[in-house]
Image (tube, helix red, strand yellow):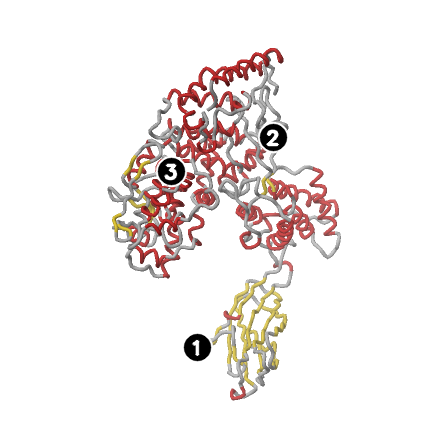
Amino acid sequence: MHSLAPLNLRLCMSFALMALAIGMSPLARAADDGKTRYTEEIEPLVMEYCLGCHGLGTKKGGVSLDEFPTPEAALNDRVLWHSVLKNVRAGLMPPAGKPRPTAEEIARLEEWVKRDVFLTNEQDPDPGRVTLRRLNRVEYRNTIRDLMGIDFRTDEEFPADDAGYGFDNIGDVLTVSPLLLEKYMQAAETIVTRAVPTAAKTMPVEVLTGSEFRAEKGSGSGARMSYYEQDEVAKTIKVEHDGTYRLVLELEIDGVFDPDPGRCRIAFSADGRELLSKDFAWADEKRETFAFEQAWKAGEHRLTIALTPLEPAEKLIKKLDMKVNSVKVEGPLEPEHWSRPKNFDRFFSDRSPSTPEQRREYSRDVLSRFAGHAFRRPVDDRTLDRLVAIAESSYADTSRTTEAGIAQAMTAVLASPRFLFRIEETEPPKPGEVHPHLDEYALASRLSYFLWSTMPDEELEKLASTGKLRKELHNQVKRMLADPRSQALVQNFTGQWLQIRDVEHFPIQPRPILRRDGLPAIPDSLIGSLRRLMKQETEMYFSYVIREDRSILDLLDSDYTFANEQLARHYGIPGVTGREMKRVELPEGSPRGGLLAQAGVLMITSNPTRTSPVKRGQFILENILGTPTPPPPPDIPALEEARQGISGREPTVREVMALHRSNAICSSCHSRMDPLGLSLENFNALGMWRETESKQPIDASGTLLSGKSFKDIRDLKAILKTDHRADFYRCLTEKLMTYALGRGIEYYDVATIDRIVNDLERHEGRFSTLLLGIIDSSPFQKRRQVGFTASSPSQPSQNGAKP
């Protein structure tokens, strides 16, 4: 909010000169109108409400609204006006005790900022820029699961993803290092080897471990037999067909470094017929393998392994054992009894090509289907030709099957940028449209990675291929939320928005926390399960709001939560029994209910040995109200230093915070954070309720910067649900949209977010209104036109083309 009379004069002169220079084109008239509206409607508000703190030589927060060199500089500072808009809407500016603009004046400011500063085109909003995104670790793992049918542990194989704007699916930070590129290549080979069969039929194989061979008497097994003790173990197996079977016995001698004089004889028999009788001496971790073929009838067959000592027990020095690693039963060896290997039908068909032409056509069909799934869109002919060539060059070796060659080409698919990155294409722009819609394949991917963190399924692919996905979008969202894969939205979004996925590894120290509050210790054996329950409570709570389409205001406060007997006991909630987590009605007047009273959130916003009003206050500002404070300045005094001002007793956190806040450097931010954080002081760092701290009653009251006072967390939650309802709507919309789009929120998103917030107000905050509002929005459905910049006006000219 800017100037004084001199700026008025400069604006008028600038308007006149611009009119002469450009002949008042439609675009110039729009700019002229914006400046006129500024001088007539906005500048009076600036002079009345803002210049006392941000002008006339006063520069609070480093912001001055009357020092712009030109009118254009004043009116085109979008970052400044975005900040002004957020602070005025949140009631932070002007500060409490100062005259404040009316609702009509705020609405006038909002309209001017969006129309004349942000240059918002309501009919075709700027959808923003999304950097080409690679799959993060969670998305890669889930995609491999659905595409290949195996679980590939990306958390063990790949380095952790960087995060931006609080989330790890942000395109700008998902870089690809040489190390990660090498790991992607290795992963492609490993995954294909594990998942893709290399023959149309395989011989049945059953592997029996040594522990499955049991002694007739006692508890011994073939897992370990001493050289110095007579032993015999056996296992009965059943085969389905008459035929020839191969038995592969693998033994391992387990000694120690020093030689032992022990010797033994191993006899291996099938149905009482001895197949092996061999003497063994000392060795250390030496393996030996023996193979035998047997003609068996269908039915049961008994395998026996007997150990006979060849030296007396008195010669034993340390340890010398024989281990049966395995007995592999292969067969029948006759091909007519072989069967389709696991996963064969996932990748291949029943066709059995024999000629080169048939093999080429078969490879083309299989790879076209596979690459289409992997790339999330149909593969082009040129790429398909190259994949088929890879397969042909591989199975040109007559010892390799067609399937083995195709598997080689699949490795190339999984190493391709088209698989690793979410490449998006657009439809041709419609008449009068600046920003084109994503094509339906890209829309299917955005939808599936948003709700499932994985690739589109067959139904989404089919709708995209027939051009019907947009028409069926809402029905598909409903279907996808009912699918178990939608739990990924719950886990990945809440896990990062609320930092709840860190609960199980947060370095909390229960003993000093409980000792400080005079509470009995919690056994170490229960701490791990308690952490898991905390995380599960938040996930089940958020999932319930989604699936029951409840108001998102339930996330602030409610008369229910989710708990089992252990967590309810931790909370002091009576009448809950059993190990199963379930919906629990809270007693009247309970401080529980809502995210802020959940132990996982309370723990993650604490220090290891005590509560942290600063962390808790900042958490509410950032994740509930959307108005975080800036990072602390360098060399700021530590909170512990303030304790030195109180001697003779242990001070409360509130007392220490008051002393710390008395420092002028700290006051501006802490006046916003501290009341919010201190409202949660009745909850210790483990989320347990307490009435005293350091043997003094806890005072959880406070006054917000907007002037609203509260006496405890119950009051604060009520204020958040009423006076700050729109702030929470806006904050959660921004967070969920950031997660959905994979980019941060910018000024050009304000109109879209405002529309969703207004819809939430009309529909009582229903989660479906929020979710569909994001999915139906221009940023989700469209992509910024190539060559368009955020500073460009987005209004189309009169003939429908971009000016």
Q: Do residues under tags 2 and 3 come within 8 Å of each other at their CB atoms?
A: no
Amino acid type at image mark 2: Thr
Q: Do residues under tags 3 and 1 come within 8 Å of each other at their CB atoms?
A: no
Above or below 115: residue 239: below
Counting the numbered discs, the total is: 3
Q: Nearer the viewer, residue 793 or 176?
A: 793
**Numbered disc in front, either 2 or 3:** 3
Residue 426's disc number:
2
Residue 129, given in percent of the width and then of the height, sits at 57, 32
Residue 416, given in percent of the width and then of the height, sits at 65, 44
Q: CA distance from mark 2 to mark 3?
A: 45 Å
Residue located beneath label 3 in the image: 672
Relative to 616, is 27 on the left or the right? Answer: right
Q: Residue at x 62, y 13 (%)?
A: 22
Element under disc 2: loop
Element under disc 3: helix
Earlier in the chain: of badge 3 and badge 1, it is 1
Above or below 629: residue 186: below
The answer to whether any part of residue 64 appears in the image is yes
Q: Nearer the viewer, residue 449 or 695?
A: 695
Earlier in the chain: of badge 2 and badge 3, it is 2
Q: CA distance from mark 3 to mark 1?
A: 72 Å
**Numbered disc in front, either 2 or 1:** 2
Residue located beneath label 1 in the image: 218
